[in-house]
Each structure stands twice: as C-alpha cells, then as structure tokens.
Image: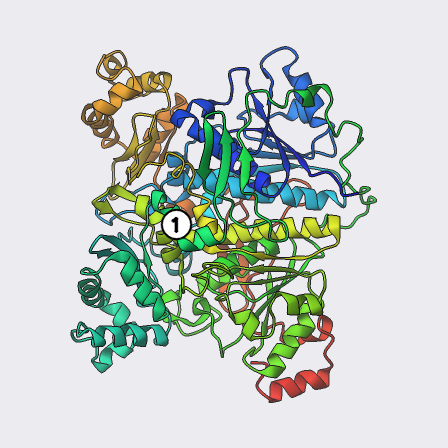
C-alpha cells in the first residue's frame, strides 16, 4: 500500500502561493487556510487570481485572530508534513513542538537582518534584489518583468525548500526554513552582479540587446522576434548563407566578419543588417524558416496566443480548471510529474470545502508522517546538508543546466561535471562571455562559469569518442541522478536515451532540460533563454505598451528552467525513496517559463505590456531620485498607505482630495499623483526616501545594481549572502549565496568552482572504479583532456 501524499498547510501570501501551486502539481495534498471572508485572491481580477493560484487545493477557514484560532491551526498541523507560511508574523506558536513539521517561512526580506520587517511587493523586491536594474533602456527608467516574477522566484525557491526539508527529515526531525524573496532575486541575475564582482563594472540596462551574447529583440512585419547570431561558427555561417541567398548580406560576407570578436565589437552594424532582413517578414514564418536552418529564433507571442503553440498543445501543457462558473483553461505546471504524468484537471475549491479536516484529519491517526525516519543518534559529527549522499552526473553547460546542478551541489549533493576542451562550454571559453579582471583566454578564470559551478568536481572527458561514452556508462552506473540540457536527440545519438540509462542503472533519476522537450512537433527547435522567453509570453509583456516592447534580454528563462529542474530532481529523489522507482523528467524550458506567466491566460483577453503599473494599486512605479541613474520603486496597496505616503512627501491634502482619494481615482489622475511623488523623490537619495516611506509602512526601495547589492545592501550583508572563497587560479572572490536557509541542515558555498579536469583521475578511480592503467590508456588516446 502506497504512503499518503505529503500534506501541506498553506498560510498564503503573494510570495508563498506559487510554492503551494507547484506542490499541487507534484501531487501533494495542499490545504489552504483562509480567513472567514476568504483569501484575498477571491476578490482579485474577478476571481481569476484565486483560480490560478489555488485550484487543486483544499480550503479550510480559520480566524487566526480569534481566541481559538491558534489551537485550530495546531490541530490541522498535527497531521501535516509541511507548513508553507507566508504570514508576516509567522505561525511559530501553532507549530511549536511539532517535530515532524517542515516549517517554510517565506517573507520579502527574510527573518533576520535590519530590513526583515520592511514591507515588500513584487516591484519593491525586484528593485532591491537587482532585477529592475537589468531591464529597460539605458537612458530610461528601470522596467519590471511582468506577472510578478520576483514573487514567483520566491515561490519556486520555497517549493525547493519544502522538498529539501522533507529530504532532511528522513534522517531527523523537521526544521524551520527561512526563504528571503530578495535573496531569491539577487541569486537569479545571470551576470547582473557578476560583472561587478569579476570586472569592477556595472553594465547599463541593455535595452533590447543582450549584454553578453549576440542576441536581442528584433521588429518583424507583424510584431517582434527574439534571436540573433547564435553561439557557434555554424550558426553564423548558416545565417550569413541565408542573407546571401536573399541578397541581403550587405558587407557581412567580408572576411573580417568571420571573427566573433569583430562582430561583437561592431554589433550595432551587424544587427542593423539583420534587422533590415527580418523587418519585412511575418514573425511566425521567419521563425519557422530560421528553425529549419537550425537557427535560434522565435516569434514573440503574447499569452493569449499560447494555446495556438503546437508544441505546448501536443505536450498537453494546459490545465482545465473547474470553477462555479464553468470550466476554464489555465497555464499548466512546469514539468510532468511523476513518471511522465501531468496534472491537467483541477478544481477551484469553495470557501471551507475542506472544513472536515479540522474535525477528523485523515492523517490524525499517525503520530508522525510516514516518511519520517528515526532521528539520527547524537554525535559530534557536523550535521549533513539535505542532499548529502546524492551523486549527480552533470552533463550540462552554459546557464540553465549548471544553475540546476548548482542548487543541488549547494545543498550537499556530490556533483560531477563532465566537460571537455573538445566540446567547450562557452562560459569557460567564449571571450564575449568571459568575466575576469585578467586576460579573457584562461578557461579557469571566468567568473560566469565559476559562479554557477561552485561546489562541483570536474572531469575532462571527450564524449565524442566511443571510449569516452564507455566511461560515461561506468559513471552512470554509480550515480543517482543524470542531468543534461542538450538538444532533444543528443543523448539518444550517444546511445544514452532513457531506456539505455535504465539498463545501466535501473533506478536512475534522469532530468533532461531541452528547450522544447523531447517530444512534440518542435522538439528539434534550437533555443536560447531569450527565444524561450519570446515563445512563453514573457518578452511580449515586458514593455511600456503594445508599440514599445523592450523584452527580457538577460537569462531569466535559463534561471527559471534551472530552478524548476532542481525542484524536479529533488521531487524525483523523494518519489524514488517512497516507491523505489527512478524516472525521466522531460523538462521543457518553454513550459518552465510559461508556467511562470501567472494569470495572464485566464482572462481570455489579449493583454499587453503595462510598464511598472499594477492592475489594482495606485500609485505604483519607479521614480527618479537624487544621483545619476538612481531610482525609487514604490507600491501603494490601499488608501491607508496612500495617506501615509501623502504625509511623508509633504502633500497631506492629496489624501482627502476627491481626485486622488481612491485607487481608481488615482489611476485616472496618474499625472497628478506621479508628478507629486516624482517631484519629492527627485530631491533625495533613493535609500533615504525608502527609509522614510518604510517607516510609515509603505512598500518602497531603491533600484539596486550589482555594485549596490554587493557593497551597500545592509540586509544581504546581515544575512551573509555574498561568500568569499579562494579559487586556485582566479584567486579570492565573492560568490552569490544560497537564498534559502535550512536551520538544521544548511546548504552553502563550500568550495570554489573546479579547475578544468582537476578531479578526473580521482573520480574515475573512486567512483567509476577504473584502474590506473586504464586511466593512463585513456589519457594517451586523448579521451581525457
């Protein structure tokens, strides 16, 4: 008889609700605790917010302010495995003494530090976490990513935290886990802070062009396209060949343009030639023609166009939700789980539909959840991190895959990275991706690579040879997990598809991370983070209006895919622990980022970019403050906060002015409201302005770039977010830290990234069981290099 699904009790908030939704997708029983009047999302966006965030959960009403509120919650928690706690003050009293409970606190700024009590919204956390500084035109204001991406980064990290807590509970009691939304954002900036850490520079906002790789946003005849020159000589040659066929190559056939450094140096000219070619063609047709040539281009679609995407439809991505008003179509979950099954039908609960759980909880007969093992005996040994004892074979490269395995390594997994000079990772070798104070020719000094590959081992193995693949097989036999982010056919061509992996290691957890997934009509499409974001709806909603799309240019899509793959890996390890079965998680990076598009599909309407505004709150925006390119982010969620803001800015009369008394009125009078707030903000530093507003309970924060995050942010400093380690070649430098803190089994940055091939002999000898003679033979044949 199988064990019951883990039970999650959710005390919801904007920063916690996505975690609950993800756990529903994993098959957990999620119980939403609502106040007697119902969760606030029932009244947002005509109820669409509730349908999206809470369908598939059960509803229990508890008045936590009532005399017996805490006692009622405690009765519910006695039969729970996880408490997902988004409340400001926390439910420690109700959880006290419940040793089986994994208590995940999700707050805007974390539980410790001088700003732990600051008010945070998606906009304000995105500003203080560094996200806003990376989006927008260099000479314009910073721009918010749509659909609450800061909140959703916190949510997926909280879901990871919950599963790490369950994993650690197999060796001991539950624990409190502290998730800081600001730290989740600061850990998800791609090169945003790394350029400062490794090159002493703060890149300007990139506008519509990626700051490192030769990709960007291009205008098509009927919209926009994401794409560019690609990342390999083959892609440049294919694009140039296409331009020449159409007699649109201008001067790009000249020998000088074969040099990628020259192309990067004069990228504006190259992009103009490409734009002239692209601009006369419809976006969907151009993308199809480009992909036929294996070129990474994608049409920029809006959310209402997603159901027409043949890849998403073929993979049964979308979810049908039953509501009192009928059936609705919503975005699906980021990956199919478990064992290839995807939840595609959900029911939005009525208020208090699960009230019987308070009277007779199904788990109440258990003294502790069945998955809890006996605690480890007390010893003098240090407590092991949650994933200690898990061995991961890391076949990933660039960002999405290495970000996944970085998370696993940070929490104790033994991660063996397989790489080779014969198939170089651009983040080690490509000059345009090299972040270093020294020459951009040493593969061991690239700050980009060294950030996402800390805590790992490196073996240099040429997998293009039969002997190299044979060594891979030896390693797979001794690993728990294989992770790769190749295109969909690479592993099969190597003879290492899922069935082959199972033959080698029957309970292997295999996580693939191709752009489109291993099945479907577009499974062979070439994708980068920007093209996946284009296809998902994210790029199309990032802008100031329909005719002013800016797009998300940095690797947010890669980060999201990495986080979701880490969640999938830990979930698969838990599933294996319960059932004895491994599985193939066929993660599509497109589906991962599309699952982060919030309520954008539910309305059925063609929504477009809305800048930094909020659909219900006013004012919300980013305002220029004292200093060069300094900005203040402010959200006003209700009339009480508006009154406080008016007093702080010296305009108390606006709080009672009929033109600005309500949020709806303030939206109509945005020129007056933004003018008053903007005039005040311009007279002082963003930090000082934020301090004054936060002292009155108004969410506000400076827009921080990489320098400010590293040097000046008191909250990140108090949490010890940036961690120094001494690399054997690159020397000492700061690493971005771990955004979730497990109080009993903490993760951390233990070791710097490995030098290329530093662990080859030791891993092949100790893990794969190769003899010194065979290792010597492999090296002589060039298989190890």
Q: Residue furthest front?
A: 326
User: Residue 496 or 554: which is nearer the viewer?
Assistant: 496
- Give the residue pinned by disc 1: 536
| x then y, percent, for residue 548 | 22, 45
Q: Is residue 713 visible?
A: no
The quadrant holding residue 632 is top left
Q: Residue at x 43, y 31 (%)?
A: 120
Q: Residue at x 65, y 70 (%)?
A: 500
Quadrant for the C terminus in the image = bottom right
Q: Is residue 456 left or right of residue 535?
A: right
Quadrant for the N terminus in the image = top right
Q: Residue at x 58, y 77 (%)?
A: 461
| x then y, percent, for residue 654 | 24, 16
Picture colour scheme = rainbow
Q: Is residue 139 visible?
A: yes
Above/below status of 69 relative to 331: above
User: Residue 197 or 414: which is nearer the viewer?
Assistant: 414
Above/below status of 98 relative to 152: above
The quadrant holding residue 665 is top left
| x then y, percent, for residue 408 | 60, 54
User: Residue 96 or 707: which is nearer the viewer?
Assistant: 96
Q: Is residue 287 left or right of residue 496?
A: left
């Amino acid at each position: 008889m199988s064990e019951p699904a883990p039970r999650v009790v959710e005390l919801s908030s904007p920063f916690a609700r996505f975690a609950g939704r993800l756990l529903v997708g994993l098959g957990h029983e999620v119980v939403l605790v609502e106040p007697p009047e119902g969760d606030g999302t029932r009244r947002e966006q005509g109820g669409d917010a509730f349908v999206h965030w809470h369908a598939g959960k059960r509803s229990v009403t508890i008045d936590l302010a009532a005399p017996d509120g805490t006692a009622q919650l405690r009765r519910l928690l006695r039969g729970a495995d996880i408490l997902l706690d988004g409340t400001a003050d926390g439910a420690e009293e109700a959880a006290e003494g419940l040793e089986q409970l994994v208590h995940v606190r999700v707050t805007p700024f974390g539980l410790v530090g001088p700003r732990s009590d600051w008010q945070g919204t998606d906009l304000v956390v995105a500003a203080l976490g560094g996200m806003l500084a990376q989006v927008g035109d260099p000479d314009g204001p910073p721009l918010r990513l749509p659909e609450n991406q800061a909140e959703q980064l916190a949510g997926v990290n909280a879901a990871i935290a919950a599963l790490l807590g369950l994993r650690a509970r197999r060796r001991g009691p539950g624990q409190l886990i502290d998730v800081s939304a600001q730290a989740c954002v600061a850990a998800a900036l791609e090169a945003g802070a790394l350029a400062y850490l490794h090159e002493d520079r703060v890149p300007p906002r990139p506008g519509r062009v990626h700051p490192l790789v030769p990709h960007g946003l291009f205008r098509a005849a009927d919209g926009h396209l994401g794409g560019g020159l690609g990342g390999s000589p083959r892609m440049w040659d294919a694009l140039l060949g296409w331009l020449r066929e159409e007699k649109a190559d201008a001067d790009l056939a000249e020998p000088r343009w074969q040099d990628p450094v020259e192309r990067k140096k004069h990228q504006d000219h190259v992009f103009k030639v490409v734009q002239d070619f692209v601009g006369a063609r419809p976006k969907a047709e151009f993308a199809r023609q480009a992909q036929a040539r294996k070129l990474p281009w994608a049409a920029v679609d809006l959310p209402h166009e997603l159901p027409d995407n043949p890849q998403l439809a073929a993979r049964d991505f979308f979810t049908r939700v039953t509501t009192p008003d009928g059936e609705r179509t919503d975005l699906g979950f980021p990956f199919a789980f478990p064992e290839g099954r995807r939840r595609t039908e959900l029911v939005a609960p009525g208020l208090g539909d699960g009230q019987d759980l308070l009277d007779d909880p199904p788990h109440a007969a258990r003294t502790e959840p069945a998955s809890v093992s006996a605690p480890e005996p007390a010893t003098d040994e240090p407590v092991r991190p949650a994933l200690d004892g898990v061995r991961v074979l890391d076949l990933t490269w660039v960002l999405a895959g290495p970000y996944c395995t970085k998370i696993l390594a940070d929490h104790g997994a033994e991660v063996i990275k397989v790489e080779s000079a014969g198939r170089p990772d651009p983040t080690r070798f490509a000059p345009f991706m090299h972040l270093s104070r020294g020459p951009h020719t040493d593969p061991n000094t690239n700050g980009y690579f060294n950030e996402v590959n800390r805590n790992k081992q490196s073996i240099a193995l040429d997998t293009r040879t039969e002997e190299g693949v044979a060594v891979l097989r030896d390693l797979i036999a001794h690993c728990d997990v294989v992770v790769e982010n190749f295109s969909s056919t690479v592993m099969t061509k190597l003879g290492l598809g899922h069935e082959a992996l199972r033959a080698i290691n029957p309970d292997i957890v295999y996580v693939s991370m191709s752009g489109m997934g291993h099945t479907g009509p577009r499974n062979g499409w070439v994708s980068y983070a920007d093209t996946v974001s284009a296809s998902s709806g994210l790029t199309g909603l990032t802008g100031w209006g329909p005719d002013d799309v800016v797009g998300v240019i940095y690797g947010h899509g890669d980060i999201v895919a990495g986080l979701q793959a880490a969640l999938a890996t830990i979930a698969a390890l838990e599933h294996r622990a319960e059932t004895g079965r491994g599985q193939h998680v066929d993660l599509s990076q497109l589906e991962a980022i599309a699952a982060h598009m919030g309520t954008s599909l539910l309305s059925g309407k063609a929504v477009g970019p809305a800048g930094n505004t909020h659909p219900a709150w006013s004012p919300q925006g980013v305002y220029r403050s004292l200093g060069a390119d300094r900005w203040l982010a402010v959200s006003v969620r209700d009339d009480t906060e508006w009154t406080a803001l008016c007093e702080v800015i010296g305009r108390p009369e606006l709080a009672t002015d009929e033109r600005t008394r309500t949020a709806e009125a303030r939206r109509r009078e945005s020129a007056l409201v933004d003018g008053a707030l903007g005039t005040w903000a311009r007279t002082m530093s963003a930090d000082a302005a934020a301090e004054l507003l936060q002292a009155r309970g108004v969410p506000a924060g400076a827009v921080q770039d990489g320098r400010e995050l590293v040097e000046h942010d008191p909250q990140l400093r108090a949490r010890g977010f940036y961690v120094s380690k001494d690399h054997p070649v690159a020397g000492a430098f700061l690493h971005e830290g771990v955004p979730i803190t497990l109080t009993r089994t903490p993760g951390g940055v233990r070791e710097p990234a490995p030098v290329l091939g530093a662990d080859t002999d030791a891993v092949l000898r100790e893990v794969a069981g190769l003899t010194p003679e065979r290792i010597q033979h492999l090296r002589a044949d060039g298989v190890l290099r």
